[in-house]
Amino acid sequence: MQLPYKNQVKLLRFIISFFCLSQASNTLHSSEQDIDYGIQFEESLLEEHPAEDIEQDTPPQKSTLRIKPYGFIRLDMMYADRNFGSLPVLIPKNIPLNSNRAARHPDFLIDARGSRVGLKATDHFKEIDLLGCIEIDFFTKEGDAIVENGRVLRLRLAFLQANFLSNFFLLAGQYWSLFKNSEFLEPKLLDYWGPVGSPFSRRQPQLRLGYRCKIDENNTMLFQTDIEKHALNTLGVVEVESLTDTSQGSGQKLPVFISKISWNNRHFIVDISGATAQSNITVNETGKEENKWVWAADLRCQIRIHPIILFSSIHHLNGLSCLGGEDFKDLAFNTKNQLLSVRSYAWYVGMEYTATKNLFFHLVYAQEKAHPLSGTSFSGNVKGEYTSLHANVLYNFWKRCQLGIEFQRDTTKSFNRVPGHVNLIHTALSYFF
C-alpha cells in the first residue's frame, strides 16, 4: 500500500532526524550556543503555537526576548550642621528655620537604602522593537533602624515602550514625568532630590506618544505628548481616610496633559515643556466641589564646549507645584472659600568639567520662590523661598565602582522673613552591575 505524499515526507524527515541523533550521540561536546538556541526555540514554539498546532510543519524561530538585571549597591554618608530628617537626601521643605531650636544640632547619617535593582527586557514583534523595565529601591522611612534596619521595597519604574519603524514610539506604565528634566539635561549630583525646584524625582503612571525626526547628522527633533496621573495636596479640607484623598490621585476628573519639544544638536540641547490640568477639591463640611485649571511651563538648555558642559533651566508653575518637587502647596482656600493657585518660579545654572575619562567635577546653583496668598494658609511663617548650592567630584576608580564627595548648602526663608539653612558634606560609594 502506497502512503500519501504528505506522510511520505514526514517518514523521510523522521528517518533523517533519527540518523542525525545517532551521529550526535557519539559526540560528548555540545556548545553553549546550541543549548541556548534549543531553549529559545522551545520557548518561541510554545509561545507562538498552541498545543494542538505543535505537530504542524513549523520552521524553527529563534526567540528575541532578552532579560537583563541591572542596578547598584550604594552607601551614603552625610554630615550636616543641622538636623533635617532621617532620609539620606535633603528635601527643601525639610530645611529647618532658625527659629526651630530642636534642629540646631549637627547630624551624621550612614545609609544604604539608596541601593537599587531592576530588570530590563527587550523583544521584537514583527516590525516593532519592545523595551520593558521594572525597577525598585528601598528609599522609604518604613523599617526598623535600630536593629535590623530593614526597609520596605518601593516601586520606581514599571513601563513598556514600543518603537516603530516610522520613528513613532509609545510608552505605557510608570515612568519619569514628561515635565521632568531629560536624562541628558540632569546635573549629576549625589543628592537624589537635585537642585531646589527641579522636578528630578517625579514619576507617574502615564501613556506617552513620541516622534523622532532626524533632520541631519547633527540635528534631531523629538516631539512628545502624554497624559499622567494627577494628584495634589489635601489642603486640610479633605481627610486622608476619606474616599477623596487627592494626595493619592482620587477625586480628579482629568489627568495632567504634558507636551515637550526637544532639539538635540551636536553642540547644544534645548527642551520646551508645557503642562495643564484641572484640579478638583471636595470640601468636607459642605460636600461642595471646587475646581481650578492650572498650568506650568519650562525651558532648559545645554551647551557642550569640550571638556565643559554648561546647562540651565527655568520654569513657572501656576497651581502645579507637584511638577517642581512639591516644595509648595498646589492650591489654597482664602477666607471667602475661593480656591486660589499657588504661583512659583525656579531656575538653576551649572557646569560639568571632564578632567579625565574617569574624573568629573560639577557645580550647580538654584533658586526657587513662590508668591504668598494673603488671606490663606499659604502666608506668614510658611516657607516661600529656597536656594541650593552643589559642588562635587565624581571618580570612577574601577569600571563598576564610583566614589563621590559633594558639598551642599541649602537655605530657606519664610514669607515673614525668618531664615533657615543646612550645610552638609555628602559622600557616596557605589558599585554598579
Image: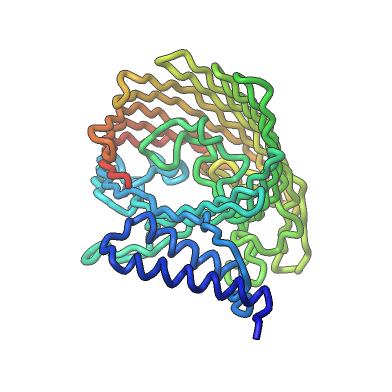
Nearest to the observer: residue 297 or residue 227: 227
Q: Specify whether 215 is left or right of 122.
A: right
For the point 62% across and 35% down, which residue is it?
344
Q: Farthest residue to the front: give it.
A: 1
Q: Quadrant of the N terminus?
A: bottom right
Nearest to the observer: residue 238 or residue 136: 136
Residue 163, how many percent across, how many down?
A: 64, 45
The answer to whether residue 95 shows anywhere in this view is: no
Vertical position of residue 377 compared to residue 144: above or below: above
**Dividing the picture into quarters, in which one does residue 285 lie?**
bottom right
For the point 72% across and 59% down, which residue is it?
252
Residue 296, how many percent across, how many down?
A: 68, 38
Residue 305, how many percent across, how many down?
A: 47, 13
For the point 50% across and 38% down, which residue is it?
414
Vertical position of residue 74 compared to residue 349: above or below: below
Q: Specify whether 368 is left or right of 53.
A: left
Q: Specify whether 84 is left or right of 128.
A: left
Nearest to the observer: residue 289 or residue 390: 390
